[in-house]
Amino acid sequence: MRPWIVAGCLCLVLPATALSAGKKGMQFWNLTGETLSDVALAPVGTREFGANQCVNDKDGTVDFDENLVIKGVAPGRYDLRLKDVHGRTCYARNVDVKADETFSVRDKDLVDCAK
């Protein structure tokens, strides 16, 4: 009788585990060609930038071609402020951020860059 109980429990737990494993959360894919030390998001048209998302990375930066987990941000359209390790600050405007998807910013998307 016990094997049937264990099998029944596994049938209930495994599908839930598989569903949650498929969700990766929001991620930023850095295609700017630079290592970034600060990535912050603000609702489009505002200057209300949130926390530095690079704190979510183990080394505090996001290298070129690296993904960064975005936390504490609702899906929507955002302006991004990106600071690289050389002190340059740039912006990417009107970026669509979706739940459980990866969004990217390329060098060609950067505007208003200044050191």
Image (spheres, helix red, strand yellow):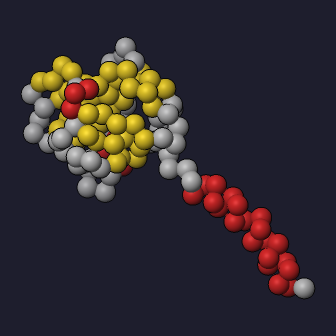
Question: Which corner quadrant holds the N terminus?
Answer: bottom right
Q: Position of residue 19 (x, y in %)?
A: 64, 55
Q: Nearer the viewer, residue 65 or 41?
A: 65
**62 w.r.t. 87: above or below:** below
| Vertical placement of residue 87 versus 18, above or below | above
User: Which image quarter: residue 27?
Assistant: top left
Looking at the image, can residue 14 be seen?
Answer: yes
Q: Seen from this angle, which residue lies furthest top?
A: 45
Asked if residue 42 can be seen in this view, the reply is: no
The residue shown at (75%, 71%) is 10
- Vertical side of 34 occupied by 45: above or below: above
List x then y, in percent, for residue 21: 57, 57
Q: Residue at x 42, y 21 (%)?
A: 43
Query: How far from the left and from the top, in percent, is residue 103?
Result: 40, 37
Is 69 positioned to the left or the right of 18 in the image?
left
Across and down, in percent, residue 112 comes to 18, 19
Q: How many marks?
A: 0
